[in-house]
Amino acid sequence: MSEDFSPDQKRYLEGFVSGVQAIRGARGAPGFGGLAPFQNQPAANAPQAEPVPAGPDAIHIEAMARFEKAGKKLSPQEKAKRDEHPFDAYARFKTMAAENKYAKQLDDFRIRFHGLFYVGPTQDSYMCRLRIHNGVLKAWQFRGVADLAEAYGGGYSHVTTRANLQVREINAQNGIPFIEGLVDIGLTSKGSGADNIRNITGTPTAGVDPQELVDTRPYAREWHHHILNDRSLYGLPRKFNVAFDGAGRIAALEDTNDIGFQAVEVKDGFGIEAGVWWRLALGGVTGHRDFARDTGVIVPLAQAIKVADAIVRVFIASGDRTDRNKARLKYVLDAWGFGTFLGEVEKQLDAKLVRAPAEAVAPRPESDRLAHIGVHPQKQSGLNWIGVGLNLGRMDCAQMRALADISQEFGDGDIRLTVWQNLLISGVRDEDVAEVEARIAAIGLATTASNVRAGLVACTGNRGCKFSAADTKGFADMIATHIDGVGLTVDTPINIHATGCHNSCAQHYIGDIGLIGARVPVGEDDSVDGFHLHVGGGFGTDAAIGRELVQNVRGEDCPAVVEKMLRGYLARRSGPDETFAAFTRRHEIDALKTIFALEGA
């Protein structure tokens, strides 16, 4: 291992060890600075061996060393993690909170390991993102988040595109009390930001879905706790997403994740045990225009966590620590190829992965793009889940408490979040459906929506994110309000995704219509919020990256432009079953501009 360290690193490590020993002598401390103690330290008069890092951070330190030995410069974030592991900075962050000071610069990066994001200058406050496995939490926890948001935040929360919750407008002195309050109600924000494995998504109707092959909840839960209790799984080259899709009616968008576990049925006659397995897909990152691709590997259900752990460890050792734009799993796969990467995973596992030919796997049940809104029968006779439409994910605290009450009084006590920025109440008896719908309407929410409104997704936008070039939520809402207001009915499912920047939190590339924020020039010296528009994206069996249709559409013009697009589609489609995505894919971009009356745009 010593050949991985340059002379400068060796001197750094030798000095570091001396510092650790001195501090231990003075304070009796077990360790310092985010690194575990080094093993096998020689006596003072013994020949000096090169220090070797040990403990859970060693795999990361060694990976950094390999890049530096190759003459490459670590990114500032990598140096920050090496200088002080973010978990070791917690006491300092508590002191800063007591002094009403925000974490800035590299400390802003470190505090994201604890789930807090300083979002200035758009909001001079923290945003806290939780981690909720499979998007399911208990009604009393949901009510508890409302209480915390009211006491420490802005009095509202958002459901995110990872079936998660985030709370905004948390001031400096309230950041730590907020995240400690989450722990008090059995939740956490640990590792929900920065270079970590984010919250684990799964099928939102897990356990109640008539068509599911697998209840994803126990697998998401096991992986969630596996991560929380292993420090070596924090501080990856970049963020990492994992999802379990049980083949239920509501898509989990697992093919947009670094690891996607897809429940499949393996048929008899192929020398493989017939039954339900996970199909392994790797490398999804749609902001970089790529879906997770089928590896040809199938995984026994009970082995998912072991395989995921091995994949992550290979990524930790090999992911780029110098270029943040190339530090995702996709780029390791592009450089190595799937065969080489899976070979390294097998070495980590000390076992062979199971390969299955495509013909051995039965077609998966299709998802229903509208099943996240409205009333739907569960597999349990006489019970239903009810999809509640939120205004682009936003709820105030009073609404959250009312939803918790409804879930406890009429449902099974679960609140189920979806990647479509809404939530489900499950376990509602047939005879209570009407009362539940009335209660939901009474708090200003709905269980019905037009297809345009139901398929609308938007990131935070420039009201709360410094990276966004446009007010995504504001203009997305304007689009749906305009389309519904002019009486235009779209009778096929349609997804409109509005994202503010190339991080693509709202995954604009997979929308039937995708909008990405842009500053649109006005005159010689000014600009306004606007978007570039894409068409033809999709997910699942219809997966595709949308193509750019037109650039620099002012935000205020987007409702009328989208109306033209939808009217052109409805007038020229081949039949009532042709989707918007299929329609746009069979036309060239110039032809679409003509059909949509966007010539010259």
Image (cartoon, rainbow, N blue to C red):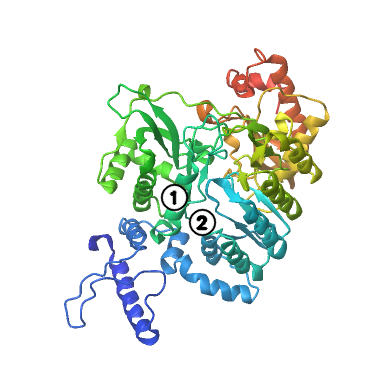
Residue 466 visible, this orientation:
no
Quadrant of the rendered image containing residue 13: bottom left
Question: Residue at label 1?
Answer: 222
**Total numbered circles:** 2
Residue 272 x %, y %: 30, 28
Quadrant in which the C terminus is drawn = top right
Q: Residues within 10 Å of mark 2 (few under 14, many from 20)?
A: many
Mark 1 or mark 2: which comes first in sequence? 2
Residue 286 x %, y %: 52, 38
* Residue 299 vertical placement versus 199 (above, below): above
Q: How far is mark 1 from mark 2, CA to CA?
A: 22 Å
Residue 221 x %, y %: 48, 49
Amino acid type, mark 2: Ala
Q: In this rendering, would 70 be left or right of 506? A: left
Amino acid type, mark 1: Glu
Residue 379 x %, y %: 56, 32
> Residue drawn 72% across and 38% down?
432
Question: Residue at label 2?
Answer: 194
SS at mark 1 in the image? helix
Q: Are marks 1 and 2 in contact (CB under 8 Å)?
A: no
